[in-house]
Image (tube, helix red, strand yellow):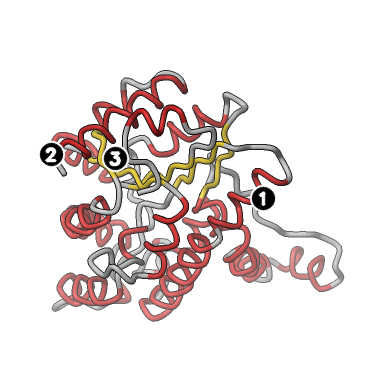
Amino acid sequence: MIYHSGAEFTAAPKKRVLLFGMSGLGKTHLSNLLRDTGNWFHYSIDYRIGTRYMGEYIADNFKREAMKVPLLRELLMTDSVYIASNITFDNLAPLSTYLGKPGDPARGGVPFAEYCKRQDQHRQAEISALHDTGRFIDRASDIYGYDNFICDTSGSICEVVEADNPADPVMKTLSENLLLVWIKGSEAHREELKRRFDRAPKPMYYRPAFLRALWAEYTDGKDPETVDPDAFLRFGYARLLEHRQPRYAAMADWGITVTAEEVATVRDAAGFHALIAAALDRTATRT
């Protein structure tokens, strides 16, 4: 780790932290809080994915739909309108919409083969965005004068790394440049995430083998083209949460762990510093 004690982190003139864990446990909340102080650069992996690496896919999908409307088709064919994604740190809907849900097109689904293609695009984009982190640390300092850097990762980071492998290129790059911090949720948090997801299922990234097994199980005896996309996502979400926990835990061996309850108490940058320092000291005591 780049910091070995709470005192070392507190005294460091350049604080570099990466937050990871399930969506909904506080990564973006903390990142926004730090960015709003004016002293931290906020690097959002999802934003980088949706702009640099999947922006063209997203815009092309919008255009594909627009071409089905005669008026818009005519305007597009004559370069009379411009269609683009308006993705922001707080509104990642264009990325989610493109990733999509497999199942019945009449209910907003996409064919499973197309869904798998988009999943692979997301995987490659996420790996590339993670590798870009070091360059953005340099850019944040050289261009904007930010010495403090917070990396707000996607909930699917654990799916695109092999943390049990000490030579994993993404994990090595990240751990050499930032302190990795797992925001760990309790069973109560996981139940709340399930309830929240049940109310509004959203597109997710799955490891290919896990997705295929899940899809085969759910569609057994069903016509895949008539599957309710939201029903499939609800079916798989609890399993995805369980699938990711050991993968997050393996990543935590490269850094430190804080709880979602602890994160909920942070109100300002000083509180964040204290949270990280305490977790570093806990880790040092155990080792």
Task: Tell me, yes or no, whether the two marked residues, 1 and 3, touch with CB atoms within 8 Å.
Answer: no
Instruction: Tell me which amino acid carries mark 1.
Output: Arg
Query: Residue 211's x, y, as percent?
Result: 26, 71
Q: How crowded is mark 1: few (under 14 residues within 10 Å), some or many (20 or more)?
A: some
Residue depicted at 61% across the width and 67% down the height: 65
Q: How far apart are marks 2 and 1 (CA)?
A: 39 Å
Whichever of callouts 2 and 1 sits on the residue coming sooner in the sequence is 1
Instruction: Tell me which amino acid carries mark 3.
Output: Ile
In this figure, which residue is indicated by the disc labeled 1? 139
Residue 93 vs 223, above or below: the answer is above
Q: Nearer the viewer, mark 2 or mark 1?
A: 1
On residue 20, the disc is: none
Task: Give 41 or 28, whichever is nearer the viewer.
Answer: 41
Residue depicted at 17% across the width and 36% down the height: 285
Numbered circles on residues, count: 3
In this figure, which residue is indicated by the disc labeled 3? 183
Task: Say left or right for 184 vs 266.
Answer: left
Residue depicted at 16% across the width and 55% down the height: 242
Q: How crowded is mark 2: few (under 14 residues within 10 Å), some or many (20 or more)?
A: few
What is the quadrant of the C terminus in the image? top left
Q: Nearer the viewer, mark 3 or mark 2?
A: 3
Query: Residue 81's x, y, as percent?
Result: 81, 60
Whichever of callouts 1 and 3 sits on the residue coming sooner in the sequence is 1
- Mark 2, secondary structure of its residue: helix
Task: Say left or right for 149 vs 69.
Answer: left
Task: Give 251 or 26, whichever is nearer the viewer.
Answer: 251
On residue 187, the disc is: 2
Instruction: Tell me which amino acid carries mark 2.
Output: Glu
